[in-house]
Amino acid sequence: MSVSMQPLSMAQTQEISLGILDFLDSYCVEHDLTYFLLGGSLIGAVRDHDLVPWDDDIDVAMPREDYERLIDEFEDTEDYRLIHMRRTEGCVYGMAKLVDRHTRYVEKYIDEQSYMGVFIDIFPLDKMMEGNVAFVRRCRFLVDLYRFGFALSKKASIGKPVKEAARRVLHVALAPFGRVKFFNCVERTFQSKPGGWLFNGWGAWGERECGPANWFESSVPVMIRGKRYPAPAGYDAWLTKVYGDYMTPPANPTYLHGKFYLIAQGLSATITD
């Protein structure tokens, strides 16, 4: 029997994403793991008590020790799988992703991966020396090399001819290292520094995504659609550092990751707009 792929609306995608978040929340409580909402998901919870209307995924972060435990100990279920370089053949993503197995996902700039569906991103938070922005910039440089050299599809168009040419050069220059080996090099660099600050090395905002560890020493509850989720106690300082005036929505938000589909075979169509 052929599989039917039904496109998901934003509302449907967000509903499934929240189901994944609820599953992760329960898992972390049961296994004594710490996680925090992060990124646009944290902004939506603080500002709107909801997901932001244009965001098609949820972002969370975990201290490195808890993150490693999750990767090593999580057992995939009938409904959810955990994607990570160490767990998933052909994985190209730097951070872990918890994926709904009844959906499929086609991204703009990365070749289609059969293991991908509606997901939440799980980022590790690593230690660093206070205010060592130069270290974060070096880490960011390695992340950019990895993304341009290994993760992005060779067929994807990313804009200006100069960037396209640079990407082609990187594909050739970095190929001898191998994707997994280069990824492990980036991860070792992230974890090479002690200190009293934390940073999100795989995040989108580079040197903005670092700050005092005491911002993440404890959590405070924030609401999304009537449910409580943990935010870092220093969420205001973190969000202000990363986004500036995060309480004012952008005038013309346009960002979407890609296209999401429901696999209809053997499923009950219970998701509504």
Image (cartoon, grey):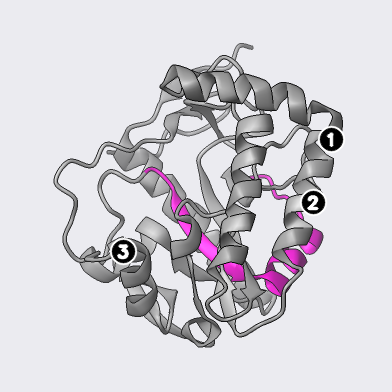
Q: How far separated are the C-alphas under marks 1 and 2?
A: 10 Å
Query: Mark 3 = which residue?
Result: 43
Contact between labelled residues 2 and 1, with CB atoms less than 8 Å apart: yes
Vertical side of 39 occupied by 165: above or below: above
Q: Which residues are magenta?
A: 56-80
Residue 73 covered by magenta stretch? yes
Tell me where residue 166 appears, x and y as whole percent: 58, 25
* First of labels 1, 2 by sequence position: 1
Q: Which mark is residue 177?
A: 1
Q: CA distance from mark 1 to mark 3?
A: 38 Å
* Labelled pair 2, 3 in contact (Cβ < 8 Å): no
Spot occupied by residue 267 in the image (x, y as percentages of width and height)? 53, 32
Residue beneath disc 2:
185
77 with respect to 159 (left or right): right
Name the amino acid type tagged 2: Cys
Q: Quadrant of the N terminus?
A: top right
Q: Quadrant of the C terminus?
A: top left
Badge 2: few (under 14), some or many (20 or more) residues near its Cα, within 10 Å? few
Say which element carries label 3. helix
Classed neighbour count for the residue bearing mark 3: other residues with Cα under 10 Å, few (<14), some (14–19), many (≥20): many
Residue located 39% across and 73% down the image = 238
Amino acid type, residue under disc 3 in the picture:
Ile
Tell me the residue at 73%/50% (across/down): 76
Residue at disc 1, secondary structure: helix
Q: Position of residue 127 (x, y in %)?
A: 65, 75
Question: Residue drawn 39% across and 40% down?
Answer: 13
